[in-house]
Amino acid sequence: MPCRLLLVDDHPALTRGLAALFSQEPDLEVCGQFASGEALLAHLEAGPPPPASLLLLDLHLPPPHDGLSLLPRLRRQWPGLRVLVFSSATSPMLVAQVAAAGARGFLDKSAEAGALLAAIRAVHTGQLVFPARVRVDASVPGPPTEPGQVDAEALLRLRQLSAREREIVGLVREGLSTRAIAARLSLAEFTVSTHRRNLMQKLGVHGLAELVRFAHEHGL
């Protein structure tokens, strides 16, 4: 099922640019663009709107509703609408407040398009996407099931792995040597070594210990 998006930002040029970007993705569909929290609320309260699944929300909006003040109301009245905050204000304290208020993710506006698309898809599938330095408190009231936290940049790196590379990193995590992995997969040891070198480069890790830690942290 495609991800149906609502965009809220007080810079129309940005929302138009984002809508153009998303229009190139077959699994994403923009079904509303708003320049204020007031306009968003009017749309949501007007009757049954087209069922949106994700809201991309800026924090700095015209009075009387900024993004942070909107979050508790959105969670209370439209709990099925997942919110990904997309903002240039990125202090750890603010990001923690956003998480506590009910957002499902936070991404800096300086992020590349690929990271934004990855974050949207992750939130749409039920994951939490916050900067790695911010701890999300799972005790904060929210949906019945709180999935694991995922760093948006890590998501982008993970998407670069081939199926074979994912298979190999899973076996590395199990503690298998290059020779054992080669025997398990009926591959030459040189081929396994090449796959390991490539996936470490894609993941931005150096050495076996970092690779194993990354695999544990991201469920590979």
Image: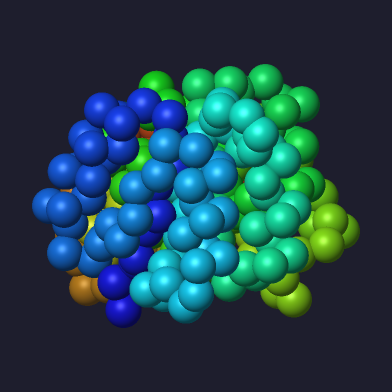
**Which residue in the rendered view is the most extreme toward the left?**
24
Colour option used: rainbow
Question: Residue at the spot x=55%, y=43% of the render?
Answer: 37
Q: Farthest right residue?
A: 139
Q: Which image quadrant is residue 156 in? A: top left
Q: Is residue 79 above or below residue 101?
A: below
Nearer to us in this view, 133 or 56: 56
Q: Is residue 104 left or right of residue 86?
A: right
Position of residue 157 relative to residue 170, above or below, is above
Task: Determine which quarter of the picture holds residue 67.
Answer: top right
The answer to whether 58 appears left or right of 160 in the picture is right
Residue drawn where x is 34% and y is 66% of the image: 3
Answer with left or right where residue 81 lies relative to residue 71.
Answer: left
Position of residue 215 measured from the top left corner of the image (x, y, whole percent): 52, 52
In the picture, the quarter occupied by the N terminus is bottom left
Please name whichever residue, 218 or 145, is drawn nearer the observer in this view of the structure.
Answer: 145
| Residue drawn at x 66%, y 46% as measured from the top left | 70
Between 171 and 204, the one nearer to me in the picture: 204
Name the spot of residue 104 as percent of width and height, x first. Answer: 60, 54
- Residue 175 picture location, percent across and down: 54, 59
Horizontal and vertical percent position of residue 117: 32, 48
Residue 157 visible (yes or no):
no
